[in-house]
Amino acid sequence: MDFASILTTALAAGIGPVAAAYALAAIGLNIHFGYTGLLNFGQVGFMLVGGYGIAISVSILGWPMWVGVLLGIACAIVLALILGFPTLRLRSDYLAIATIAAGEILRLFYMSSYAEPVTGGVYGLQQFAGDFYDLNPFPPDRYELGPLSFGAPELWIMIVGWGLVALAAVLVYLLIHSPWGRIIRSIREDEEAARSLGKNVYWYKMQALVLGGVLGAFGGMVMVVNTQSASANSFDPVVTFFLYTLLVLGGAGRVFGPILGSVLFWFIVVGFDALLRSMIANGILPFLESGDIGAIRLSIVGLGLLLLMVYRPQGILGRREEMVLDAR
Amino acid sequence: MPDDVKTTSAFDGVVAEPGVAKPDPIMVADNVTRRFGGLHAVNVDHLEVQRGAITALIGPNGAGKTTFFNLLTGFDRAGSGKWTFDGDDMSHMPAYRVARHGMVRTFQLTKALARLTVLENMLLGATEQRGERMFNALIRPLWGGQEQANRVRAEELLDRFKLIHLKDAYAGTLSGGQRKLLEMARGLMVQPKMIMLDEPMAGVNPALVQSLLQHIIDLRDEGMTVCFVEHDMDMVMGISDWIVVLAEGEIIAEGRPSEIGANRAVIDAYLGKEHGTAPSEEAS
């Protein structure tokens, strides 16, 4: 078995564009869940409208890609308003129900034959990120990063993706360490107390939902631009639960929690995949076939989340004492 | 009990009867009702609360005291009714706007924001913070000065309520009594005209009760209107200027502490109408 190659595969996934996309979406989810206490189980829906915002603008409408970015942001804002308007006055469970349903409705709608003229239906849309890759300052070549090697387009999307992650982290840091952030966190603790001190809780919850949703849309954009392909099936509900897993892993309610979480999550998941594959290929696990790996990956994520909840519920960057106080 | 407390003279000549007019009411409520299914939880015809005085709202369990509090402060919706506060119509106003109008409440079960520090809890109370707008929040120079001023005021209040040594502790680590103090101090950060305390003494150890009572009296002496709900008749008698008695949602009596103590209707409400008769008859 080639452990060096397993490790490089895992490393490449940990710092790859997919990890950046998930980190962005998880930063958004962190605003919802980690800071405001909003239970959004449909973050993938925001990623979907963001990704398709670019794909549809370029492939179907023939607009330049930057307009597609704006459209993706606008779609995320509208989705947040639609979800938040009826549910944010109610108990937090209602937002959870509405978001999980909305994410699934969006996925099914985007791949329906009815929507095919616009979304490409089950086939999705491809090759819409030409504008983006035309801006690539790196000449086509292989670029070595320690033991890793990337092509120029991959390097370009990685740099832009992680650049966006850094920007989002700075944004969240500034917001959370401000009076605005104080209100957001007080809503997480007890929204009636915030209300009794003259804070318009509904409005702040709406702002948080919109902001986190827009960051989710950026995550979706990085995802589709990376593969030059938007397909509704890649926006499966399980994506949201991966986001929760990596957020809890890194530490919810911490600025760097979702970033560290995403890197580790993809390092572990892909590394584990590669390990299994190599073990199967070498006949170490004769009762398994490579087709089983997808299912095993899901159970491993579930098991990991379970162990995390038992042994380190605050995540890697979380503060133990905060967890103890969270006795609602 | 602090026996040497001076009550205000504002109530001179006011007759002790339900719904009586006060010389300078800060709040006037009319026909406020709230039903839970068939139950008339609150049914208040008329109530005036005197400005700058300590008014206690008492009554047996289930009398509707907290519900009435919730209605006035916008935390529950009244079925009908109209009430004004300092001249403004406050009926059916959302809770956050009630607070901004200068009527701030505390809760029976304290709502300390556990994972915020004591100082952050205090700062949250400050009103009209520029940094509370999302775009301003990104630019610290826009709100840093104001934040510093609020911090100074918060620390003064924490000092007064003897919580200053805990300012960087998570509020969730405070004892029950300290949380009551924090909640009161936090309410004062809003700079209210009237503070409504829902059972401020519940679950507080006796040593801290004295200091809490003194804080309430000090607030009144500084010109604040205080209205509070309380079970314990002894506490109420000691510090109230005026007492309003609720039973089954209606005001059955109003008056000075001495008058309420001797009021037949109040004793009946607390002990049951049968209290004078033999136990054997009660059992029937």
Image: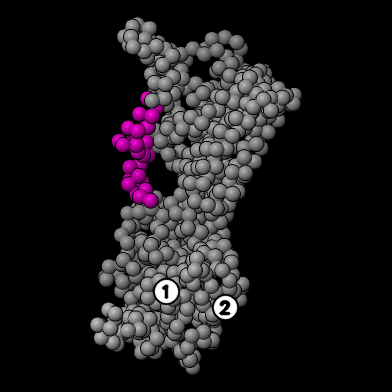
| SS category of the residue bearing label 2 | strand
For this orientation, the residue located farthest to the bottom is B13
The prevailing secondary structure element of the residues shown in magenta is helix
Q: CA distance from mark 2 to mark 1?
A: 18 Å
For this orientation, the residue located farthest to the front is B284
| Residue tagged 2 | B30
In the rendered image, residue A316 lying in the magenta stretch gets the answer: yes
Kindly report which numbered mark, 2 or 1, lies closer to the viewer in this rendering: 1
* Percent x, y of residue B273: 35, 84
In this rendered view, identify the residue nearer to me: A272 or A315. A272
In this rendered view, identify the residue nearer to me: A91 or A195. A91
| SS category of the residue bearing label 1 | loop
The answer to whether residue B232 is above or below residue A122 is below
Q: Report the chain holding disc 1.
A: B
Left/right of residue B213 with respect to residue A195 in the rendered view: left
- Residue in view at x 57 percent, y 78 percent: B30
Q: Are marks 2 and 1 in contact (CB under 8 Å)?
A: no
| Residue tagged 1 | B63
- Residue in view at x 65 percent, y 24 percent: A121
Left/right of residue A221 with respect to residue A13 in the rendered view: right
- Residue in view at x 37 percent, y 75 percent: B60
In this rendered view, identify the residue nearer to me: A123 or A261. A123
* Percent x, y of residue B258: 37, 89
Please rate how many residues cluster around mark 2, counting C-alpha atoms within 10 Å: few if below 14, some from 14 to 19, many from 20. Answer: some
**The disc labelled 2 sits on which kind of residue?**
Asp
Asked if both marks, 2 and 1, belong to the same chain, the answer given is yes
* Percent x, y of residue A78: 64, 41
Span colored in magenta: A300-328
The answer to whether residue A20 is above or below residue B64 is above
